[in-house]
Image: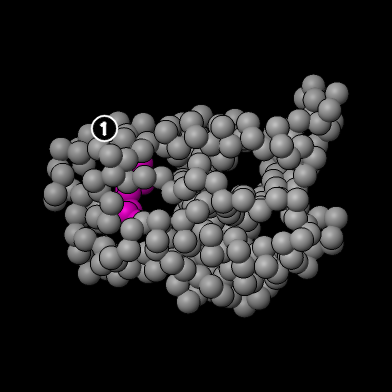
Amino acid sequence: MEQKWPQQIWVVRHGQSAGNVARELAEAASEHLIDIADRDVDVPLSDLGVRQAHALAAWFAALPERHRPSVVLYSPYVRARGTALTVIERLGRDSLLSAVADERLREKEFGIVDRLTPLGIASKYPELHEQRKHVGKFYFRPPGGESWCDVILRLRSVIDTITREYRGERVLIIAHQVIVNCFRYLLERMDEETILAVDRASDVPNCGVTSYAFDPNLGKNGKLVLQVANFVAPLEDAGTPVTAKPDVPAAPKS
């Protein structure tokens, strides 16, 4: 039977963004609003994020040619696109079967709580704050925004595309923290409790790599197997600082 899955999938969070930095400053000062004027889609990489993207690109380019990505899919958000284009340029676009921005890989939409710190959410929308604590982040959908389940729904169609168009290929996906965790939920067949435990344990590092390899000997037709999660050696090997802050806005762990 024809192989359903790619030979390899890497899921990577973008490099540190200006929003990550602004959020950290706002929380440290107990502010209600994160001081960033850009739309979430337009938030760029920080200077450190650019360095992280270059370290990531160098690591992929140093792999043996038969092990490098042959497909790059990425969120159109500026911070993810900038990370992806750095990798694509280093690999050489002509070496790739496909390099495509896909809006289904965008950040989770925060709706009316966009740019608010946890303190700001609790102050401005106390009823929503209490509802979120009761419902939990997996199912809670802020007005105008998305729940994790909403994100998972659109990622199911991304997986359909990958299994239809990129069988046997080596697929690199560059997106956002929630996207990385939601892919893990799908590819590792987790439940709500398991993925939220993963989320509580640590934030996804900027340019951290989670990778899966196809094993033809598992299951009826083979399966993808987790190799590493939140792997940061590409940054450490280059002497680039590792950062792991949530995206805007922060949501309390639950």
Q: What residue type is labelled 1?
A: His
- What secondary structure is found at the residue carrying circle 1? helix
Q: In this view, does 102 lie above or below 15?
A: above
Residue 212's x, y, as percent?
70, 44
Is the residue 9 above or below the residue 130 in the image? below
- Residue 201 among those drawn in magenta: no
3 or 220, which is in the foreground? 3
On the image, numbered disc 1 is attached to which residue?
Answer: 134
Number of marks in picture = 1
Name the spot of residue 103 as percent of width and height, x first. 50, 45
195 and 64: which is toward the camera: 64
Residue ID at (84%, 28%): 2
Q: Is residue 94 left or right of residue 180?
A: right
Which quadrant would the C terminus be assigned to in this image? top left
Say whether residue 203 is visible. yes
Residue 1, located in which quarter of the rendered image? top right
Residue occupying image coordinates x 54% and y 65%: 82
Residue drawn where x is 60% and y is 64% of the image: 85
The magenta segment is 247-254
